[in-house]
């Protein structure tokens, strides 16, 4: 069983101060047409470009990615895909490869989101996708998260396995191309009652860093940004980032509402 307080002790020696902050907008299967996608992005763009220490990453559906990246490469704004396949090209009907994503000037790829895992994506498949994305020069946003918590802490082992299996054969050199998103499934989406408590988010950040250090055995593993996702809103942004000690947020529903997403970016940047 992993001991969280022992992890705190190990980690307090490392300075995380240099890491930039991230606000990632996961649009999921929204909006319904390209005009609306352009409208949302246009509304967010100015605020995101003005941020001083925060990178905003927009992850729209594949079909809008090219349109949005062509609108321009503002300072501090990047684009990401919500998924990818693990082959570069070939007879894979309906799939999109990391090479194609990179070719659309997107630099990030969300992999292993719980909504994809619920469609049958296993840790092995996630790992194939992670390695293919890294090989193609994408930065991977690897999502992990438990469906429920238990008093015995079984979920801690579950999260460790998601990390270890998802990152199998990833090299130390590839660490700068990695972000981890802790997204407890029970806190995601409209059906969730609330976000994870900031204190619990902090514990999971410590767990993630401890496991990364164990896997890679270099201090660079401690610099991998860890973000939180699950019912993020302007109202809980400050406490989640400040008390949760995360390097940023992965925002679903609120990333589609321009005023809310802009507020989240501003709050994160000001912290
Ligand atoms: P939510 O989604 O912010 O709507 O809870 C987060 C996510 O699934 O990435």
Image (cartoon, rainbow, N blue to C red):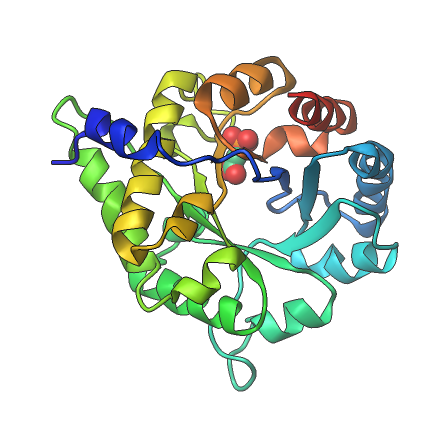
In percent of width and height, residue 58 lies at 69, 46
Residue at x 52% of width, y 67% of height: 133
Q: Is residue 220 above or below residue 198?
A: below
In percent of width and height, residue 270 lies at 70, 21
Residue at x 82% of width, y 31% of height: 47
Residue at x 23% of width, y 28% of height: 4
Q: Is residue 235 above or below residue 33?
A: above
**Which of the image's four quarters has the N terminus?**
top left
Q: Nearer the viewer, residue 30 or 234?
A: 234
Residue 86 seen anywhere in this rendered image of the structure: yes
Residue 114 seen anywhere in this rendered image of the structure: no
When asked about the image quadrant of residue 81, the answer is bottom right
In percent of width and height, residue 172 lies at 40, 63
Q: Nearer the viewer, residue 138 or 87?
A: 138
Q: For this view, does 74 lie left or right of residue 57?
A: right
**Which of the image's four quarters has the C terminus?**
top right
Q: How many numbered circles are shown?
A: 0
Residue at x 52% of width, y 25% of height: 231
The outermost residue toward the front is 13
């Amino acid at each position: 069983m992993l001991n969280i307080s022992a992890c705190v002790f190990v980690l307090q020696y490392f300075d995380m101060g240099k890491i930039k902050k991230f606000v990632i907008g996961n649009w999921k299967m929204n909006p319904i047409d390209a005009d609306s996608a352009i409208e949302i992005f246009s509304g967010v763009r100015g605020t995101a470009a003005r941020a001083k220490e925060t990178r905003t990453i927009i992850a729209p559906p594949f079909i809008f990615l090219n349109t949005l990246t062509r609108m321009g490469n503002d300072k501090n704004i990047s684009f990401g895909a919500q998924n990818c396949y693990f082959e570069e090209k070939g007879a894979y009907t309906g799939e999109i490869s990391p090479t194609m994503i990179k070719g659309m000037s997107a630099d990030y790829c969300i992999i292993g989101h719980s909504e994809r895992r619920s469609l049958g994506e296993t840790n092995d498949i996630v790992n194939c996708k992670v390695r293919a994305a890294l090989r193609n020069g994408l930065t991977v946003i690897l999502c992990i998260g438990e469906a429920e918590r238990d008093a015995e802490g079984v979920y801690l082992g579950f999260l460790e396995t998601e990390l270890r299996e998802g990152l199998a054969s990833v090299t130390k050199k590839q660490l700068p191309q990695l972000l981890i998103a802790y997204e407890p499934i029970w806190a995601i989406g409209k059906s969730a009652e609330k976000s994870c408590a900031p204190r619990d988010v902090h514990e999971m950040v410590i767990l993630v860093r401890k496991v990364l250090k164990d896997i890679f055995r270099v201090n660079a593993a401690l610099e991998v940004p860890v973000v939180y996702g699950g019912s993020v809103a302007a109202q809980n942004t400050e406490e989640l980032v400040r008390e949760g000690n995360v390097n940023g947020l992965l925002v679903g529903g609120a990333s589609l509402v321009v005023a809310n997403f802009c507020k989240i970016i501003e709050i994160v940047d000001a912290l």
